[in-house]
């Protein structure tokens, strides 16, 4: 087959399409993961032709360093690697509690909702509250008070907030910083002589480990997501090899660190890449956008 990488990229899109249809609640996560991963499509120039030699549509890899196939492949990989854990273990991503938010104790919530306590509310107190003087309500909403709260000087002071505080409040800046760190780490490893695929895998694992250090709750989802993504990655490669016999022998270069090592005919290098991608894609969006994994609602509630 002439355009082998195109076929592989289309295969990698299929799991994401199925998840998109079956789990609408994960679509926002998939879109964020896809956008955050797009810069990695441009790293094809580091893999081609050192690691492999596929033929690209319109010879774009020879002209620009990457092709349409890279974009499709990255989007497909990010879609299923970011959601594999949530789908298999029936989890949903929900916003983390704001730092310092008060947590109502269970016994206090129960006390507030006991019928007996509600019944003992004194009618006199309710009547006193109802007799709030109109003058007091007017005093709370006087125009000069509202004007004082919106003076240009106050707005200017708020606008002079420190840049690092503004950056912390913007999830996409956090995501961009994380992507830049991963690319810089991979670049440093390449400069040190590490082969490109292993540099990419080590960079994904190292940066994700740092994120897990700040968010310990993402450790188990990250590890399970890595294993699930590696298994799905292997399955897709096996389908690819069945459709295009001998493709790995013809197109892939011999492994540098694991020469000739395969699993069911698939280069171990590729499985390691799927493992690193699954770890990073499970942890990174949750960290960047302030989300956590929680039990997913039932199907009927999601549909409603």
Image (spheres, grey):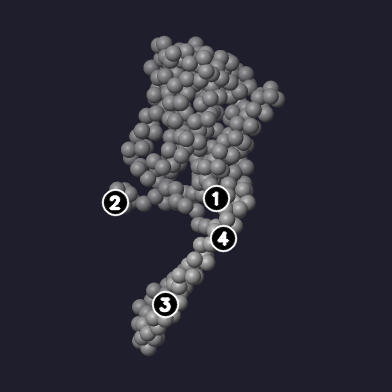
Question: Of residues 261 and 288, which is closer to you in this image?
Answer: 288
Mark 1 Cα shell of 10 Å, populated few (<14), some (14-19), many (≥20): few
Residue at (61%, 23%) from the top-left corner?
196
Report the Cα–Cα distance between label 3 and label 4. Answer: 25 Å
Mark 4 Cα shell of 10 Å, populated few (<14), some (14-19), many (≥20): few
The answer to which of marks 3 and 4 sits earlier in the sequence is 3
Report the Cα–Cα distance between label 3 and label 1. Answer: 35 Å
The answer to which of marks 2 and 1 sits earlier in the sequence is 1
The answer to which of marks 3 and 2 sits earlier in the sequence is 3
Report the Cα–Cα distance between label 2 and label 1. Answer: 31 Å
Q: Under tag 3, what secondary structure? A: helix
Residue underneath mark 3: 137
Task: Give residue 154's mark.
Answer: 4
Q: From the top left corner, tell me how far across and down residue 110 is, in percent.
A: 42, 72
In the image, residue 278 sits, relative to residue 114, either above or below, namely above
Using the rendered view, name the quadrant where residue 118 is placed.
bottom left
Task: Give residue 304's mark.
Answer: 2
Residue at (45%, 51%) from the top-left corner?
94
In the image, residue 66 sits, relative to residue 291, either above or below, namely above
Question: Of residues 188 and 14, which is closer to you in this image?
Answer: 188
Task: Give residue 169's mark.
Answer: 1
Tag in front: 4 or 2: 4
Tag in front: 4 or 1: 4
Tag in front: 2 or 1: 1
Using the rendered view, name the quadrant where residue 239 is placed.
top left
The answer to which of marks 4 and 2 sits earlier in the sequence is 4
In the image, residue 291 sits, relative to residue 64, either above or below, namely below
């Amino acid at each position: 087959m002439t355009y082998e990488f195109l076929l592989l990229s289309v295969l990698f899109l299929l799991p994401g399409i199925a998840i998109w249809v079956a789990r609408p609640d994960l679509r926002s996560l998939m879109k964020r993961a896809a956008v955050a991963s797009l810069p990695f499509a441009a790293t094809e120039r580091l893999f081609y032709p050192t690691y492999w030699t596929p033929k690209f549509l319109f010879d774009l890899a020879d002209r620009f360093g990457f092709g349409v196939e890279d974009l499709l492949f990255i989007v497909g990989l990010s879609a299923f690697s970011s959601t594999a854990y949530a789908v298999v273990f029936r989890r949903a991503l929900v916003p983390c509690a704001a730092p310092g938010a008060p947590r109502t104790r269970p016994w206090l919530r129960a006390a507030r909702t006991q019928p007996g306590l509600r019944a003992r509310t004194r009618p006199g107190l309710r009547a006193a509250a109802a007799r709030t003087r109109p003058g007091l309500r007017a005093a709370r909403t006087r125009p000069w008070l509202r004007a004082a709260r919106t003076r240009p000087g106050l707005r200017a002071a708020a606008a002079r907030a420190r840049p690092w505080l503004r950056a912390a409040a913007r999830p996409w800046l956090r995501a961009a910083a994380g992507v830049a760190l991963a690319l810089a780490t991979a670049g440093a490893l390449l400069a040190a002589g590490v082969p490109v695929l292993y540099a990419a895998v080590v960079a994904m694992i190292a940066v994700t480990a740092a994120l897990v250090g700040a968010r310990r709750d993402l450790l188990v989802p990250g590890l399970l997501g890595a294993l699930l993504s590696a298994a799905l990655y292997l399955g897709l490669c096996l389908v690819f090899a069945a459709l295009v016999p001998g493709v790995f022998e013809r197109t892939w270069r011999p492994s540098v660190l694991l020469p000739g090592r395969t699993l069911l005919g698939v280069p171990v290098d590729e499985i390691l890449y799927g493992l690193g991608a699954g770890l990073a894609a499970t942890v990174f969006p949750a960290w960047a956008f302030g989300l956590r994994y929680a039990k997913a609602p039932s199907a009927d509630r999601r549909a409603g």
